């Protein structure tokens, strides 16, 4: 059953991406790389590829709901699916507007915020999380209050959901700088959650089905997005990947630490780049060449090699999430931090040698 839906999602995404490419070309929605020298691509590439993943995922999800199968009625409820769908719609609308009209950053961020609030509104959130230091669990159900007739809001849980989703959305957005990178890492993350959900300790078939459908859609799109890319995710697509993966981590029983481990490098990269931009006195949303994938390119790796290296570390972290206990996950996170520092060090040394020769 799981394999069949993975293949359905994969094939549907492959086919849908082709039609999205045609549509975006007709609408003249391109990434015009020539306008920004920091971009690697030197020709116009269609945007809006996230639409193909979105369509593929929700067509299969709603087909399962309408067929009245046993999925999405135990671990995941229809109400949660509705919240996920509405949040995704908000992101896709915002992404389309940005791809078409190049919105200013203060307008771009409104859509991720609204999407995160929609998840909170539909009551999607963990009531407890595992203590990262292995000391039991942390109760998030305190400080519950009611706002008019909208239902109960759990302050700590809802605040965690909001911060977590915003972090995940901007992690995949920042990852979307090389062909196939964001979609490939999202594929790895969803596969890890899939296998984790099938373990006897957890066994959540609803979560596993949702994860494998998302994984298939990401892989189908990756065939078109692999270097040299025929289409890019676009603003909506890059945000949607992090949003869906982030929600998946929440509704799978608070597997936030597991997903964070798979996404460790882009998450660490976010904080590092923000600090660098803040020190330079520039806006944190302004693009530059400070991301980890840019550093790997400076060292001398090709675009494909850089993507495969980052895939390898995400896969390594995924294996750590599957087989390690909390202590092992913390050690893996520390190891990744050291690896990132080493990459930055070698990139800095090579850049200084280049400037010296020049």
Image (spheres, rainbow, N blue to C red):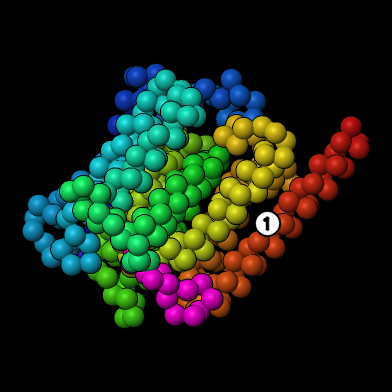
Q: Secondary structure at mark 1?
A: helix
For image coordinates 72% across by 36% down, the residue present is 280
Answer yes or no: is residue 11 visible.
no
Q: Is residue 306 left or right of residue 245?
A: right
Residue 235 at x, y percent in the picture: 43, 34
Please identify the quadrant where the C terminus is shown.
top right
> Residue 88 colored magenta?
no
Residue 314 at x, y percent in the picture: 53, 60
Residue 64 at x, y percent in the picture: 15, 55
**Outermost residue, right side:** 356
Q: Which residue is mark 1?
A: 340
Q: Magenta stretch: give its range.
A: 126-139
Where on the picture, by quarter, is residue 343? bottom right
Where on the picture, by quarter, is residue 356? top right
Q: Nearer the viewer, residue 228 or 268?
A: 268
Q: Nearer the viewer, residue 129 or 199?
A: 129
Q: Residues within 10 Å of mark 1 (few under 14, many from 20)?
A: some
* Vertical arrangement, residue 22 with respect to residue 265, above or below: above
């Amino acid at each position: 059953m799981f394999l069949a839906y993975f293949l359905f999602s994969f094939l549907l995404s492959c086919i849908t991406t082709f039609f999205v490419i045609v549509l975006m070309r007709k609408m003249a929605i391109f990434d015009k790389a020539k306008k920004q020298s920091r971009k690697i691509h030197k020709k116009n590439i269609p945007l809006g590829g996230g639409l193909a993943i979105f369509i593929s995922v929700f067509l299969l999800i709603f087909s399962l709901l309408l067929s009245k199968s046993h999925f999405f009625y135990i671990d995941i409820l229809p109400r949660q699916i509705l919240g996920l769908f509405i949040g995704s719609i908000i992101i896709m609308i915002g992404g389309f507007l940005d791809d078409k009209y190049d919105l200013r950053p203060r307008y771009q961020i409104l859509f991720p915020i609204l999407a995160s609030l929609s998840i909170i509104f539909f009551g999607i959130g963990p009531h407890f999380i595992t203590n990262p230091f292995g000391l039991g669990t942390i109760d998030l159900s305190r400080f519950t209050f009611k706002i008019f007739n909208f239902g109960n809001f759990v302050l700590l849980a809802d605040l965690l959901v909001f911060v977590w989703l915003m972090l995940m959305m901007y992690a995949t957005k920042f990852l979307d700088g090389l062909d196939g990178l964001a979609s490939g890492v999202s594929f790895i993350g969803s596969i890890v959650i899939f296998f984790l959900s099938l373990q006897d300790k957890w066994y959540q078939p609803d979560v596993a089905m949702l994860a494998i459908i998302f994984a298939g859609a990401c892989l189908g799109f990756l065939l078109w997005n692999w270097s040299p890319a025929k289409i890019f995710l676009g603003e909506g697509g890059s945000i949607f990947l992090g949003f869906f993966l982030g929600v998946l981590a929440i509704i799978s029983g608070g597997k936030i630490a597991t997903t964070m481990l798979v996404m460790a490098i882009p998450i660490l990269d976010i904080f590092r780049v923000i600090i660098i931009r803040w020190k330079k006195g520039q806006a944190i949303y302004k693009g530059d060449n400070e991301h980890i994938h840019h550093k790997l390119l400076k060292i001398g790796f090709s675009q494909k090699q850089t993507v495969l290296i980052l895939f390898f570390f995400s896969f390594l972290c995924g294996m750590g999430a599957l087989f390690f206990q909390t202590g092992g996950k913390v050690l893996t996170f520390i190891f990744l931090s050291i690896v990132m520092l080493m990459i930055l060090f070698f990139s800095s040394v090579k850049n200084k040698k280049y400037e010296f020769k020049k």
